[in-house]
Each structure stands twice: as structure tokens, then as C-alpha cells.
Image (spheres, rainbow, N blue to C red):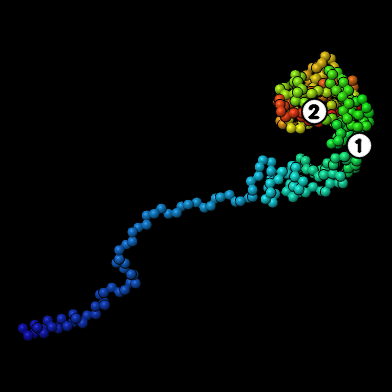
Amino acid sequence: MFRLALVSFALTAVACSVDQSAIVPGDTGVVVDSGEDEPEDTSTPDSGSGDTGTIDSGPGCGPGETSCDGTCVDLRTNISHCGSCNNACDAPPADATSTCSARRCGFICDDGFAPDGSGGCAVNVCGDGYLDASEACDDSNMQNGDGCSWDACALEGTPGLCGAPQLTVNRAVQSYRGQIAATDPSGMACEGSGQETSFMLAVNFVGNLTIAVRPAGFDAVLTVYDTNSVPCPGTPKSCGNDGGEGATEERTLSGVTTGEHYLLVVSSANDLGAMGPSDFVIELSGFGS
């Protein structure tokens, strides 16, 4: 029994002296999270798009306008930006004012002056073909009895065929001021319901005749009758109402000849009503021999 006790004690001593580190795993450096997990984030990730706003390019401009240095201008008529931004028209000659028309620079002579043919302006005289503000007409000649007096550039009102004032048309640019009274009757115009007035054109050349009517603030209608073979008012030859209020109406008569007569009727497309007398300018241009 004593021997068995010694053996048992010896085995126990050996077991107690074994290095436990040989059977215990080493430290792996991994921290074991033994705490509770946080709730899972189930919110929708931000998927918003980037800023797609339009870059500010200056003030918004209306139809026919362009932004030049932040200012809206019309390149067709602005003398500081004529045709393109910052293209300023040159200073005008003496007694003139700079203009920009159809994107091109030019100038217009002041009242009392007219183009002198050399790029400047000279004192206006009756018969030079330039319709000054003080003139009722200018037919580019120095004759009386042709519808425009040479000494005063005044409408003569010489009665012609159909009882209308007669204007003798030559190979030159001729301008006449006219007026439609609100009480004038309508009846010979090719269209419209407004008032009218008429002129007889007596041709004194061979070629083509261009008739332009430039109204002041109303919708003009241009009607031309051929009175050479048919009694007044004659045979309708041309009718023009292409534009609206204030727009120029223009027609060309081809193959006219000396001695022919044409009745020109200038009317309003609509009743002038309380508008009262309405002014216009007739410009006649003869081309030929």
C-alpha cells in the first residue's frame, strides 16, 4: 500500500509540473468583440445627382437681341454694337447723326442738310432729291407744274386724270409726303376697310417704276390701277399689303413708257377711327431711259 501511495504521489507531481503553455493556444492578436452589435443602418444611401443648374450667362435677352457685356442690344440697329458686340460706328460727318441699319454703319444728315455726294452733308436745297423735314416733296428737279414746286418743294396738287393730284415721274428718286384723313371714303383699295387717298402718276421715261409707301403708324395698303385703256379708276394692276402696322409697302411696275398714267391709291387696312389724319411718304424710283 505504501508503494502504491508513492507511485500515485509521483504521477501527480509529474502532472503538475507539465508546462501548460505547450497546450494553450498563443495570443493571435485578434480582439474578440464580446459586446452586443449595433443596430444595422438600413437608411437609403444618398443618391442625389450633382448640380446640373445652368451657368449664369447674363440677363435674358428678348427676340432679336444679343447680350454684349451683360447688356441686351439689337446688333441690327445699335451704333455701339453694329453687326457684332463692341463694333462701334465711326463718328459721323458734320451736321449728321450716326446710324446702324441692317447691321451696317452709316449716317443721316440733320434737318436742313442733305448728302453732298462726297460722304458729307451740305445745306439742303429744294430739288436735290433729298426729302428734308421742312419739305413736302422733292422730285430731284427744278421745275414747276410736275406735282412738286422747285422753289418751295411744296405739293402743287395739279389735278390729273380721275381728279387725283398728278405727279410726273422721271428717272430719279422722288419723294412726296401724303396724308389720309379719317373722313376719306373707301372704295378703290384692293382690300381692307379703312380710308384712302389717291395720286395720278404720269410717266415721263421708259423702263421700270418702283413705288414704295412708308406709313407712319398704320397698316398701309398699296393699290395701282392702269388707266391707259380703261376709264377711271382703270384696271387693277398691283395690290400690296405684305406688312403690318408701319411696314413699307413696295411694288415695281415693269415696262412703263412715256405718256402712260397709273392711279396710285394709298389706304389703311383698318378704319382709322379716332386715330385721325395719318401721314405717309411715297417714294418713286424710275429706272430706264
Type of amino acid at the residue the image marks with label 1: Val
Question: In the rendered image of this protein, does residue 87 appear above or below residue 243?
Answer: below
Type of amino acid at the residue the image marks with label 2: Gln
* In front of the other: 114 or 171: 114
* In front of the other: 9 or 172: 172
Residue at 82% from the left image edge and 24% from the top image edge? 253
Whether pointer 2 and pointer 1 mark residues with C-beta atoms closer than 8 Å, the reply is no
Q: Residues within 10 Å of mark 1 (few under 14, many from 20)?
A: some
Task: State the mark number for residue 185.
Answer: none
* In front of the other: 167 or 77: 167
Q: Position of residue 219 (x, y in %)?
A: 73, 29
Q: Position of residue 91 (x, y in %)?
A: 83, 48
Residue at which label 2 appears: 179
Whole-angstrom CA distance, mark 2 to mark 1, is 23 Å
Question: In the rendered image of this protein, does residue 10 appear above or below residue 155?
Answer: below
* View extreme (left): residue: 1
Label 1: element kind: loop
Residue at 84% from the left image edge and 36% from the top image edge? 133
